[in-house]
Amino acid sequence: MPKTAPLRLSSPGVDRPPATLAGLLREWLPGQRWFAGKDRPVADLDVLSTTELFPGCLHLLVRASHTGVPAPVGTPPPGDCYQLLLGVREYVSPRLARAYIGRVQEGPLAGLAVYDALQDPRSAELLLERLRHPGTTGPLHFEADPSVSVPAGLTPRLLGAEQSNSSLVYGDRFILKVFRRIQPGVNPDLELPGALAAQGCTRVPAPVAWFRTAEPRAATLGVLQPFLPDASDGWALALRALADGAEFTTQAHELGQATADVHLALAAAFPSGSGTGNEHTATAMTERLEAAAHAVPALRPFVPGLRTAFGALVGRETWPPAQRIHGDLHLGQVLRAGRDWFVIDFEGEPSKPLAERRSAQSPVRDIAGMLRSFDYAARQRRPWRPEWARRCREAFCAGYAARAGWDPRIQHALLRAYETDRAVYEVLYEARHRPDWLPVPMAAIERLAVRGG
């Protein structure tokens, strides 16, 4: 098998038979939930690195470029880098039928069957063993917190709910998130929990082990953290309360406190950032609004009113100051175990550049994301429960204020702007992916388009 050697899978503009590894992956990748380019044909596949992680398992970093996307003259089509772990065998057992990609007939792997190794319990076990023993394998670096002991022999299971990454749970004690879409730099899902742990913040499971590519363009590939087996995510808890006709204000108040705890710890862990300023933020929000309105006609009648939400930011003092934040906070990103709330998934929005996700931003962005999530939950059942959502929003802000020392509701113009920006994003997302859900953000758009909404 090839080991730590670059491998060109195809030539630009040339369609190879499906029996090549390139052909197999070009058919397989768009069907994966974590593949970001489903709406863009794959023009070419290059492997940036290939490493024999252990016998029968190849680690690949694959660049998928796309047709139909404008690119500067003389440059290759735009693309994304993905992490793949491929099992390689002469024959694949029936229990791995769902993981099967195909049989290669040409190239270095000719005659061998390939499959998604993360769905193979044996490969998952060996991956954990590699994380338990820090060191290097070719260009891959495995590192760990020496104060935490990870036992051997933990039974793995692959979670099926995630969309942008893949996660393995080991013995209900640890969870390994394997990042699929790779960008150079430290992933916030490693950086921020590690910094929060150093601050003594217990709201976030601390990293136990991780692996990355080598310098100088190091990229985080995966993070192992403690698993909370008895925890329920906030989305499931909110829907359960709605189904039972119960209030959720106590939980929302405590969640506001937990969010403030995380923000305070992040502000202490990282030097204060200047951010981009309200005028720049307002301009960026307006540009996103105009792009969304161009794509979704239902949004167009509300554009003048929504612009006022962004225009109100110009000339205002930037408060609270910009800092590191979660970046994609909603009810699905928090867990409740016993009476405690935990915050997870600090990766931010994977579609955005890593530098943007690691930049200082207003903490109001996280608050607005959670407020929109309450509204989404309330609209999952009929009749809709807008008052339930309103009470949750009030309780969350009150809990946040009790810990943070400032009340998001007092910064009404800033909160309205970030809620509007989030709702515009939701409209575009739902129109593209879940048209039946479009009325949910459109109801918020109607409210937010009115000055003072």
Image (cartoon, rainbow, N blue to C red):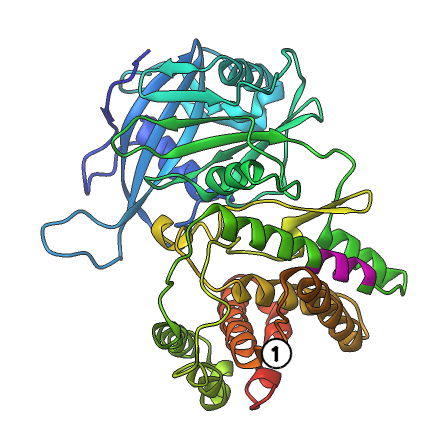
Q: Is residue 390 above or below residue 179?
A: below
Q: Is residue 145 magenta?
A: no
Of 315 and 86, the residue lying toward us = 315
Q: Secondary structure at mark 1?
A: loop
Seen from the viewer's position, the closer of residues 112 and 313 is: 313
Residue 111 horizontal/vertical position (percent): 36, 14
> Does residue 104 appear in the picture of this structure?
no
Task: Please tell me how many numbered marks the rendered image carries.
Answer: 1
- Compared across the picture, whether 128 is left or right of 300 comes to right
Residue 251 on the magenta segment:
yes
Using the image, determine if residue 190 lies above or below residue 114: below
Q: Main secondary structure of the magenta part?
A: helix
Q: Which residue is mark 1?
A: 410
Q: Tell me which corner region of the image, top left, top right, bottom left or bottom right, holds residue 218.
A: top left
In this image, 150 relative to 296: left or right?
Answer: right
Percent of width and height locating residue 148: 60, 20
* Residue 109 visible in image: yes
| Residue furthest left as drawn | 74
Residue 29 picture quarter: top left
The N terminus is located in which quarter?
top left
Q: Is residue 435 left or right of residue 254?
A: left
Residue type pointed to by label 1 = Ile
Q: Residues within 10 Å of mark 1 (few under 14, many from 20)?
A: few
> Considering the image in quadrants, where does the C terminus appear?
bottom right
| Above or below for 49 versus 366 | above
Range covered by the magenta-colored residues: 250-256
Picture coordinates of residue 188 (x, y %)?
46, 44
Residue 341, x across and y down, in percent:
72, 48
Give the residue drawn at x 59%, y 31%: 225
Q: Return the residue nearer the eye: 334 or 101.
A: 334
Instruction: Work out whether residue 246 or residue 148 is closer to the camera in this orientation and state it.
Output: 148
